[in-house]
Image (spheres, grey):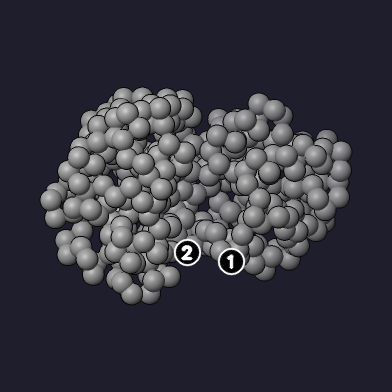
């Protein structure tokens, strides 16, 4: 998909300076980008714990492929910390200035508005869904999880396959959210997903429908007001946990068959939570930053995220092209389960969050702890 620069362009500006000006990948010679990045010798990352989404393997893969140092800042930082690191180092080209960030969805547009990031479209840009990327290339989705059901198979014989199943009498005192829906984004989106599955339109209406569903679930005695996690799943306190699939799959592996865990993506109401990548507007190593992005969005980089159970943003396109090894697919719910995944817009998230957090106590009345 990349194209060569014209001789006229090369005659008017040096390769390194041209690449540093925020030109899109579609107009850049990748060999020149690699050379310019190697000349810089380093890329500085922030907030990338090695056990999150396979980032340890991602970082080693980039270093092995290009021989460029990865300077890792504060792996336990949050999205707000990442933006603050850019602000604090605007005039600092030293090792504390991040080149790239990996932040929650809402932080991408906020960083653009504040002028903290610069545009760059990777070579695989066309395979990133339009609703999770900035049309000018300032930020773009990198990986996501979908809300799933983690099921303790020692207790639950027949796993639920859709939201409506959770109302069945055999799931009495069984179903939990992985957070308090008055505060936890994961839990709020769980309520929202149920609302979509029950006919709610995207935004506030789905939030309202989700509250109605959980009210019914609570009245039926099926909802457990306990924050679900691997321990409560294994102990049987919450035999079914509504959880991001990457947490559920990692939890399954951690429990190692004791008990056996089934991870199910529901047949409807498949809601995705996405993170986004961006390059700092003040990146000390702009070419290395762009090469880092090219690596992340290449088949190799995307598969390393998938190996850490985070669905890469190009998952559907790669699955359709037969680019995902069968052994990886075998560890996941069926690929077709993800084809219907929806990515709520910022406006939709804001509307449904207000509805869910404001109405949980009065509509559902379960004090989740």
- Residue 250 sits in which quadrant? bottom left
Q: How would you rate the neighbour count of disc 2 (Cα within 10 Å): few for under 14, some for 14-19, many for 20 or more?
A: many
Name the one closer to the observer, 76 or 232: 232
Q: Is residue 346 above or below residue 336?
A: above
In the rendered structure, the answer to whether residue 365 lies left or right of residue 308 reads left
Residue at 61 percent across and 59 percent down: it is 49
Q: Which residue is mark 2?
A: 307
Q: Give how far across and how far down residue 282 sits, in percent.
A: 78, 39
Residue at 67 percent across and 68 percent down: it is 64
Q: Which mark is residue 183?
A: none
Marks 1 and 2 in Cβ contact (< 8 Å): yes
The CA distance from mark 1 to mark 2 is 9 Å
Q: Earlier in the sequence, mark 1 or mark 2?
A: 1
In the rendered structure, the answer to whether residue 260 lies left or right of residue 130 reads left
Q: Secondary structure at mark 1?
A: helix
Residue at 29 percent across and 50 percent down: it is 224
- Residue 361 sits in which quadrant? top left
Q: Give how far across and how far down residue 353 sits, in percent.
A: 43, 30
Q: Secondary structure at mark 2?
A: helix
Q: How would you rate the neighbour count of disc 1 (Cα within 10 Å): few for under 14, some for 14-19, many for 20 or more?
A: some
Residue at 63 percent across and 34 percent down: it is 138
Q: Give how far across and how far down residue 290 sits, in percent.
A: 68, 47
Name the one closer to the observer, 359 or 251: 359
- All told, the count of numbered labels is 2
- Residue 245 sits in which quadrant? bottom left
| Residue 146 visible at all | no
Q: Which residue is mark 1?
A: 57
Q: Is residue 292 above or below residue 79?
A: below
| Residue 177 visible at all | yes
Name the one closer to the observer, 328 or 271: 271
């Amino acid at each position: 998909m990349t194209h060569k620069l014209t001789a006229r362009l090369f005659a008017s500006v040096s390769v390194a300076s041209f690449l540093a000006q925020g030109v899109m990948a579609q107009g850049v010679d990748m060999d020149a980008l690699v050379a310019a990045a190697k000349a810089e010798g380093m890329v500085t990352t922030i907030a990338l714990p090695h056990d999150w989404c396979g980032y340890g393997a991602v970082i080693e893969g980039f270093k092995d492929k290009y021989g460029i140092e990865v300077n890792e800042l504060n792996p336990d930082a949050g999205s707000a910390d990442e933006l603050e690191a850019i602000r604090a180092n605007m005039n600092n080209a030293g090792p504390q200035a991040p080149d790239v960030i990996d932040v929650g969805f809402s932080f991408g547009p906020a960083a653009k508005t504040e002028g903290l990031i610069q545009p760059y479209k990777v070579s695989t840009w066309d395979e990133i869904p339009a609703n999770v990327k900035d049309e000018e290339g300032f930020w773009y989705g990198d990986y996501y999880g979908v809300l799933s059901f983690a099921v303790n198979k020692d207790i639950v014989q027949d796993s639920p396959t859709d939201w409506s199943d959770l109302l069945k009498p055999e799931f009495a005192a069984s179903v939990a959210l992985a957070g308090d829906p008055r505060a936890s984004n994961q839990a709020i989106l769980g309520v929202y997903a149920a609302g979509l599955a029950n006919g709610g339109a995207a935004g506030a209406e789905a939030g309202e429908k989700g509250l109605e569903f959980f009210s019914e679930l609570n009245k039926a005695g099926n909802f457990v007001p306990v924050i679900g996690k691997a321990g409560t799943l294994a102990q049987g306190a919450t035999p079914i946990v509504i959880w991001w699939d990457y947490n559920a799959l990692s939890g399954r592996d951690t429990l190692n068959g004791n008990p056996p865990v089934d991870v199910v993506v529901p047949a409807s109401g498949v809601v995705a939570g996405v993170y986004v990548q961006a390059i700092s507007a003040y990146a000390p190593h702009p070419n290395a930053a762009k090469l880092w992005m090219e690596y992340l969005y290449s088949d190799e980089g995307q598969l390393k995220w998938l190996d850490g159970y985070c669905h890469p943003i190009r998952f559907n396109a790669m699955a359709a092209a037969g680019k995902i090894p069968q052994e990886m697919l075998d560890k996941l719910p069926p690929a077709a389960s993800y084809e219907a995944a929806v990515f709520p817009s910022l406006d939709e998230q804001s509307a449904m969050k207000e509805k869910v957090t404001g109405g949980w106590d009065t509509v559902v009345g379960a004090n989740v702890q």
